[in-house]
Amino acid sequence: MLTLYPLLPDVVSIPKTNENFRLLYDTKGRFRLHSVRDEEAKFKLCKVRSIQFGQKGIPYLNTYDGRTIRYPDPLIKANDTIKLDLESNKITDFIKFDVGNVVMVTGGRNRGRVGVIKNREKQKGSFETIHIQDATGHEFATRLGNVFIIGKGTKPWVSLHKGKGIKLSIIEEAKKRLAAQAASSA
């Protein structure tokens, strides 16, 4: 039996209970299992690491999870996201890494946050910085390597957990906990 560790956003299926889960980060940077429907469990999003040419000029792409796919769409470039059908291992669609698309941060201090790309900033001798705005209007920045495209426009292709990737401040979290305690005791 081959055992592999799951990566973001892998689908974990339990056939005995007919349950499917997608592995996502919460806003505190921890892995969380998010329950998904059967239709959503049939595909996976993969970030393209590189596009290369093999022997005899055959193009292929490498994804962050180690997959190599031959003859991809010529419009797909590095840092784009592909929608991979898990049954046939074929690319069904892809999302360009463009301003205005929905992203999830997969590394750094903002891991687990979800937002829309506002702009890309490239400075000589430094990392490329991506500026992101979440649903509440808060803006933050992170490195290009920490960003994973999860949807076109403002609509994600995968369902998100109940927090929708919005990071609350310490005071907002305390108020939310107090409101939940008051509601449960009343």
Image (spheres, rainbow, N blue to C red):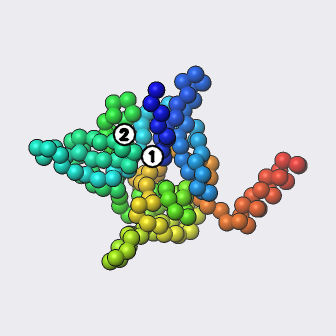
Q: Residue furthest bottom?
A: 124
Give 23 or 85, whichever is nearer the viewer.
23
Instruction: State whether residue 87 is above or below residue 49.
Output: above
Neighbor class of circle 1 (other Cα within 10 Å; few <14, some 14-19, many 20+) is: some
Earlier residue among tags 2 and 1: 2
User: Residue flagged by tag 1: what amino acid is it?
Assistant: Trp
Instruction: State whether residue 127 is above or below residue 78.
Output: below
The answer to whether one can see residue 37 in this image is no
User: Residue flagged by tag 2: what amino acid is it?
Assistant: Leu
- Judging by the rendered image, the residue that carries numbered circle 2 is 84
Q: At 34% from the left edge and 42% from the top edge, which residue is drawn?
A: 67
Whole-percent x and y of residue 107? 50, 59
Identify the disc placed on residue 157: 1
Whole-percent x and y of residue 131? 45, 69
Whole-percent x and y of residue 105? 49, 58
Asked if residue 3 lies left or right of residue 162, the reply is left
Q: Secondary structure at mark 2?
A: strand
Q: At 41% from the left edge and 58% from the top edge, which residue is drawn?
A: 101
